[in-house]
Amino acid sequence: MTTFTVATAIALAGCSAGTGGSSMPGMNHGSASPSGSAADTTGGHNAADAGFARMMIPHHAQAVQISEIMLAKSDIPAQVTALAGRIKAAQGPEIEKMTGWLKDWNEPAGMSGDHTMKGMVDNQDIAKLEAAQGREAARLFLTHMIAHHQGAVAMAQKEGADGKNPDALKLGKDIVTAQESEIKEMQDLLGTL
């Protein structure tokens, strides 16, 4: 597999570390006050911003991984291959941006506690996608990526409601706009397969 897959595995491993019980963005990771917002001295962000970045990084990493699986296949409809290329090109730099924010904010990159992120594809379904060819692979990719994008949109909307950092809020808004458009495109493509 690619070095990105190794990085994905490391990022995802960070999600399962720890013993806390939070399950969604906005969780208290020790940097927030009891009301859920961090002090202004932490770089103009709050717990929701940090949680958004921590959860969106492995979520995006999986979207890139799944897109790479599709891009390695030679018998995929051109529109699906083009979409996989666009997803990889958009989400790779967003991972770097969010990783940089966490570093700048002196926030840990890994998540603590048991986190469930909507839309994540389990290992069994990834194996099925890797083994599939042609239209079957395209259908699996589109079906999984629609659900994956819906999960990302939900996380980004939560950031829009609870976040504070202007850059994180803008990224959340951009994710909602881009991925809602891609969901519609993928639903249309599914109808042609």
Image (cartoon, rainbow, N blue to C red):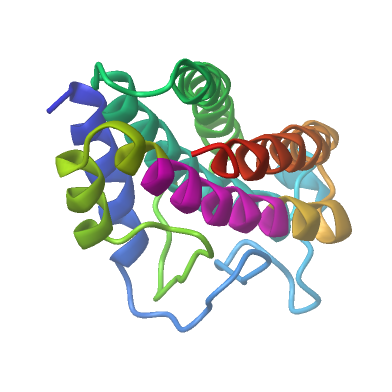
Q: Tell me: 41 left or right of 135.
A: right
Q: Is residue 130 above or below residue 64?
A: below
Task: Locate the N terminus by quadrant.
Answer: top left
- In percent of width and height, residue 150 lies at 64, 55
Where residue 100 sits in the image (x, y, percent)?
A: 54, 27
* Residue 115: % across, % down: 45, 71
Looking at the image, residue 87 lies above or below residue 124: above
Q: Position of residue 99 (x, y in %)?
A: 50, 32
Main SS category, magenta section: helix
Point out the stretch of residues depicted in magenta.
139-155
Q: Residue at x 78, y 31 (%)?
A: 167
Identified at 23% across, 44% down, the residue is: 9
The foreground one among 183 and 106 is 183
Which residue is depicted at the point 43% across and 59% down? 111
| Residue 142 lies in the magenta-colored region | yes
- The residue sitting at 53% across, 76% down in the picture is 23
Horizontal side of 178 relative to 74 (left or right) equals: right
In the rendered view, does 98 fall on the left or right side of 176?
left
Residue 192 position by quadrant: top right
- Against 182, residue 121 (above or below) is below
Q: Going by the picture, which residue comes out furthest to the bottom?
A: 21
Q: Choose top left, top right, bottom left or bottom right for residue 81.
A: top left
